[in-house]
Amino acid sequence: MLKAVCAELRRPEGRPARPGAPVIFREKEGVPPLSHYYVVWDGFKGFSQEIRSSVVYKAVLKCLGKPEVLNTTIVMGLTVEEARNMGLQV
């Protein structure tokens, strides 16, 4: 799971995502800008929210570095159905 989320975090803008890859929503708000990461992926099915959040947090740390993770206040791993129920356009 960590590998898949990390690969998507590192994917260059403009390059198409692999089929079945996680979809990542990143919000920035506040001063200093704080980040919220919502990772939508059916690969999370069957795993607790605690494990999912841990995977997203570790991926942000590993792939984007300590400064970014220190400015991240929300990390969530969601299935497509859960994301739609939250109002995310997937």
Image: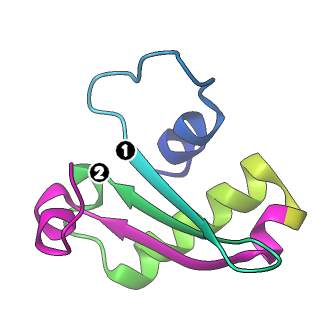
Q: Which residue is mark 1?
A: 23
Give the colouring mode of the picture.
rainbow
Pointer 1 local density, CA inside 10 Å: few below 14, some 14–19, many at least 20? some
Kindly indicate the quadrant of the structure image that contains residue 31: bottom right
Q: Would you place residue 21 above or below residue 39 in this image? A: above
Q: Which residue is mark 2?
A: 41
Q: Which residue type carries mark 1? A: Val
C-beta proximity under 8 Å, tags 2 and 1: yes
Instruction: Measure the alpha-carbon separation of dots 2 and 1.
Output: 6 Å
Q: Is residue 40 left or right of residue 10?
A: left
Magenta stretch encompasses residue 79? yes
Q: How many marks?
A: 2
Magenta stretch encompasses residue 44? no
**Residue at point 87%, 65% (across, down):** 66
Q: Would you place residue 10 above or below residue 68 in this image? A: above
Q: Which residues are magenta?
A: 68-90
**Residue at point 54%, 51% (across, down):** 2
- Residue 74, position as x, y percentages in the image: 55, 79
- Residue 57, position as x, y percentages in the image: 62, 69
Q: Which residue type carries mark 2? A: Trp
Kindly indicate the quadrant of the structure image that contains residue 3: top right
Pointer 2 local density, CA inside 10 Å: few below 14, some 14–19, many at least 20? many
